[in-house]
Amino acid sequence: MAWLYILVGVVLLLSLYRIFRAQLFAKINSKMCAKYNKMIASEKETLFQKLNEQAKAKGRTYTILELGGGSGTNFGFVKEPVHWVVTEPNMAFAQYFQENVKKNGGDHHISELIEAKAEDLSQFPNASMDAVVVSLVLCTVQDPQRVMNEVQRVLRPGGHFFFIEHVISQPGTILRYVQIVLSKARIWPFLFEGCQLHRDTGKLVKQQPGFAKTEVTDFKLNTSSLLLGFVRSHVYGVATR
């Protein structure tokens, strides 16, 4: 009978996790992102260099739409004051978002966290944004192609899409096989709010016909963490509308 008690215990734990997953994920993610930002600080500074240059030229009217902004971990990387709009489907992040606004918001005009999925930005007019930013978001959305369509719709002509994402490992590696299995078996997505390990975001952005120019840079996390080892391969880049 011991196996039955163990099984019931596991089922109860999984059920409780499912109920409180959004809150737990928001709390854990907010703490991890601070460490993660230190690990990839140089990549983020390089990524947002063009954004800072354009924001300086345009001033406070420069408008950024960040999708899935969570706790607002990118605020400190944009040095020039801008108008910043942030969407997030998991509103359990709201508390941590407000804390980060006070800590790293600087002179930005930052709107209240808006509840919205990246696939549906209908509340934002066509060609209304100077920049759209995503950071570890396209791995979690249900329909990446629909997100890209929305990104292109809300960007002004000449606007920029800034992204930094983890991606699937190189072909022929054991890690790539593990990433595919964990994703398709729904194990990793269940634990990490829908995150998919086997997406190739750099390729997705490059294939978008609506961009005049796309620059993508590959890099790997320098980490000994077992958990982060599953998302070691990354890309960052800028696509111009």
Image (cartoon, helix red, strand yellow):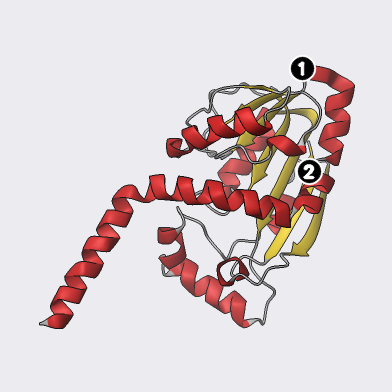
**Residue 34's x, y, as percent?**
63, 48
Would you name the residue on which mark 2 appears? Answer: 239
Rate crowding at label 1 as few (under 14), some (14 to 19) or many (20 or more) other CA atoms within 10 Å: few
Report whether 224 appears left or right of 114: right
Q: Quadrant of residue 15?
A: bottom left
Q: Is residue 65 visible from the viewing direction of this image?
A: yes
Depth order, front residue of 170/204: 170
Q: Is residue 210 left or right of residue 178?
A: right
| 2 or 1: tag closer to the N-terminus | 1
Tell me the quarter of the image containing the N terminus. Answer: bottom left
* Helix, strand or loop at mark 1: helix
In this view, the residue in front, 198 or 5, is 5
In screen coordinates, is 35 left or right of 90? right
Q: So how many labels did they put on this image?
A: 2
Check whether the beta carbons of the residues at disc 2 and disc 1 lie within 8 A of each other: no
- Against 150, is 112 above or below? above
The residue located at (22%, 62%) in the rendering is: 12
Query: Marks 2/1: CA distance?
Result: 21 Å
Location of residue 71 in the rendering, given as x and y in whole percent from the top left corner: 56, 39
Residue 136 visible in this rendered orientation of the protein: no
Residue lying at the far left in this picture: please name it. 1
Q: Give the residue pinned by disc 1.
A: 61
Q: For mark 2, give the secondary structure.
A: strand
Residue 176, x across and y down, in percent: 61, 75
Q: Which residue occupies the foreground of this view, 21 or 139? A: 21
Q: Amino acid at mark 1?
A: Thr
112 versus 193 height, above or below: above
Q: Nearer the viewer, residue 12 or 205?
A: 12
